[in-house]
Image: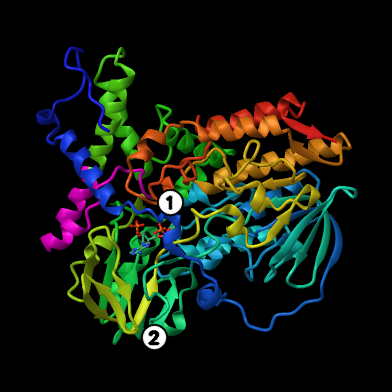
């Protein structure tokens, strides 16, 4: 697995003595930790929230009993999903003069992931000045550098009001079916509210984090105490709100399963208030510094028009691995890449590709050593500290950023239940079993994430039928098939947004806005040539699928990573989050789309 530079080649690599650690030993340790976690059931290990588990998916934020008259409308566009993706699509359509559209959203309001995720401490890890969309258009500056969930949810509502999107929205409404009518050149979209929309175009933006999942642990349905998923936080039970203050837990024994990005943020609040907290861990997260600060109004005054797009472009370029002079954001997201820059700068320019790759690995080791050192210097109990150290490369799992998580393990009422990569044995009526020992709890919280890794068609939660009634689930049975990540053969005029074979970057809202602008402009182009439908040629689609399935800058990296949704739970079958993506980086993808549009000939599409 490990690469080495041959002894006969002059090497520009630092020695283990110079580095203060042995890269070979770390490689071996990472491989051993990966091996512990590999399992043959991969994504099938998770329990879908249906049947006896359906209550985990109920919307706790709406009053029961909502009704409204059914709608029967002729539309230009139906947008599925009212998260930032759906809102951005709507805003960009409006800008392009397309106003006859509806947004269908299963939740009771806009916000998407920020509607659902109201757990204590919920915060965006991407700087708010980048993440909150349309700041300049609306004239809003986030209160802090890293925004908490209520501010982000309020911003989604602000976008809804500012761009008059509420009048277009059908909330608490689930699409039941979308069916293409070839003769009419329309989709018929039906919903669980009895609506029937006839629409020329569909934009699918139902999001990757829309459906919670449970671990498929034996007995997971047997627990008789109180239980909920973090994305449906039960404040009636815990007390408090998203800022914390979970006072009703003072006499409760609480267990939490999962230690991903969500758990890192809510565990400090649970630790502060629960009588006893057990943190059941399978794989520790990498937890870097947060260092949040209030926005300086003087700084905000200095921002020049176009600043948000400029800042986003700079951040995205750096994450794409482009070596730039200026780092506008300068936070921990780009720090591993800076380490590589430093290593490269102190070497001559004729460094070989192989040596450069090894230096990149060394920079990553250095970064992760810092993360592990932070654990050692913060957590007092050496065994707990050892358990909290992540033994994998920086981008194997979603990096997290928090200043309260690690100190929480110094509290006497908080216990890390490390399962050495195996997960808990089983759940019982009264608690959780680890290594044959039952830990009784009153409340069991699942911080076990979302259906990111399962089939897109399963996550969309409705049937889509294209030409000749072909189900999308069949067309995509072997995996997603798109052209440019948007359009699919046999499913005319239906655009997909989100993580669909696209140019992926850490700031999703920037990715979504680029996608939304592309879709709106493409629909405008179709309208201006009075065409009825567009869809990819089979050849263009096949070529795109081949391109995204081929190697990208993360392929080799992910292949040796500890399992997670980034690499299809370690299967490396090309369906992981960081696997089927545009190989040349996000900015190159957006630029390619712009050039393709300018060309104006719909290359790769059939336009009728
Ligand atoms: P994740 O999927 O990231 O984490 C799920 C956790 O559950 C992991 O720790 C996983 O362990 C654990 N788990 C799963 N099965 C078992 C089992 N059988 N036994 C024990 N543990 C188990 O979900 P999150 O909700 O934490 O985050 C989802 C995504 O949401 C993030 O990756 C991120 O993209 C996004 N997010 C973003 C935030 C932001 O700041 N913008 C904040 C919070 C979330 P293992 O690692 O071993 O699989």
The magenta segment is 369-397
**319 or 604: nearer the eye?**
604
Quadrant for the N terminus in the image: top left
Which residue does the image show at 19% across and 13% down from the upper left? 10
What is the quadrant of residue 148 in the picture? bottom left
Q: Is residue 390 magenta?
A: yes
Give the image location of residue 278, x and y in percent.
Answer: 26, 73
Q: Quadrant of residue 604?
A: top right
User: Seen in the image, is 590 located left or right of residue 77?
Assistant: left
- What kind of element bears circle 1? helix
Foreground pick, 395 / 46: 46
| Residue at 56%, 43% in the rendered image | 511
Number of dots carrying numbers: 2
| Residue at x 40%, y 83% (from the top left corner) | 226
Q: Position of residue 450 (x, y in %)?
A: 48, 61
Q: Which residue in the protein does label 2 denote?
A: 224
């Amino acid at each position: 697995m490990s690469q080495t530079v041959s002894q006969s080649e002059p090497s520009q690599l630092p020695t283990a003595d110079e580095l203060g650690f042995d890269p070979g030993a770390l490689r071996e340790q990472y491989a051993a930790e990966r091996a512990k976690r590999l399992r043959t059931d991969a994504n099938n290990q998770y329990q879908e929230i249906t049947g006896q588990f359906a209550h985990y998916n109920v919307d706790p934020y709406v009053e029961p009993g909502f009704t409204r008259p059914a709608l029967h409308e002729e539309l230009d566009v139906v947008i599925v999903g009212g998260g930032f993706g759906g809102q951005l699509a709507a805003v960009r359509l409006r800008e392009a003069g397309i106003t006859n559209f509806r947004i269908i959203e299963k939740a009771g309001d806009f916000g998407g992931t920020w509607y659902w995720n109201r757990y204590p401490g919920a915060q965006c890890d991407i700087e708010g000045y980048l993440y909150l969309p349309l700041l300049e258009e609306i004239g809003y500056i986030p209160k802090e550098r890293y925004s908490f969930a209520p501010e982000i949810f309020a911003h989604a509502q602000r976008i809804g009001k500012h761009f008059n999107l509420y009048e277009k929205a059908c909330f608490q409404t689930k699409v039941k079916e979308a069916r293409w009518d070839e003769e009419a050149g329309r989709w018929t979209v039906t919903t669980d509210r009895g609506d029937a929309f006839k629409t020329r175009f569909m934009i699918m933006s139902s999001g990757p984090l829309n459906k919670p999942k449970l671990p498929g642990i034996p007995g997971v349905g047997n627990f008789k105490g109180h239980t909920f998923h973090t994305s449906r936080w039960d404040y009636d039970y815990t007390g408090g709100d998203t800022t914390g203050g979970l006072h009703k837990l003072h006499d409760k024994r609480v267990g939490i399963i999962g230690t991903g990005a969500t758990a890192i943020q809510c565990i400090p609040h649970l630790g502060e208030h629960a009588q006893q907290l057990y943190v059941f861990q399978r794989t520790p997260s990498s937890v870097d510094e947060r260092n949040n600060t209030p926005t300086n109004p003087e700084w905000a005054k200095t921002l020049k028009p176009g600043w948000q797009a400029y800042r986003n472009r700079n951040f995205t370029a750096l994450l794409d691995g482009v070596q730039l002079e200026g780092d506008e954001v300068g936070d921990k997201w780009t720090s591993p890449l800076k380490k590589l820059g430093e290593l490269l700068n102190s070497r001559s320019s004729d460094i070989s590709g192989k040596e450069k790759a090894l230096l990149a690995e060394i920079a990553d080791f250095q970064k992760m050593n810092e993360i592990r050192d932070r654990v050692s210097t913060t957590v007092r109990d050496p065994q707990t500290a050892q358990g909290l150290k992540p033994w994998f490369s920086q981008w194997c799992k979603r990096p997290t950023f928090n200043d309260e998580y690690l100190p929480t393990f110094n509290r006497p009422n908080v216990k890390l239940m490390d399962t050495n990569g195996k997960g808990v044995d089983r759940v019982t009526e009264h608690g959780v079993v680890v290594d044959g020992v039952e830990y009784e709890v009153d409340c069991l919280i699942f911080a076990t994430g979302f259906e990111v890794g399962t089939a897109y068609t399963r996550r969309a939660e409705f049937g889509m039928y294209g030409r000749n009634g072909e189900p999308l689930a069949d067309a995509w049975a072997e995996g997603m098939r798109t052209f440019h990540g948007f359009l699919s053969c046999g499913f005319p005029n239906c655009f997909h947004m989100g993580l669909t074979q696209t140019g992926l970057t850490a700031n999703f809202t920037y990715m979504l806005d680029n996608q939304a602008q592309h879709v709106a402009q493409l629909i405008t182009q179709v309208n201006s040539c009075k065409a009825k439908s567009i869809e990819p040629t089979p050849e263009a689609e096949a070529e795109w699928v081949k391109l995204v399935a081929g190697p990208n800058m993360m392929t080799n990296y992910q292949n040796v990573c500890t399992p997670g949704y980034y690499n299809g739970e370690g299967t490396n079958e090309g369906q992981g989050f960081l696997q089927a993506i545009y190989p040349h980086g996000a900015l190159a993808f957006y630029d390619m789309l712009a050039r393709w549009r300018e060309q104006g000939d719909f290359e790769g599409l059939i336009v009728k």
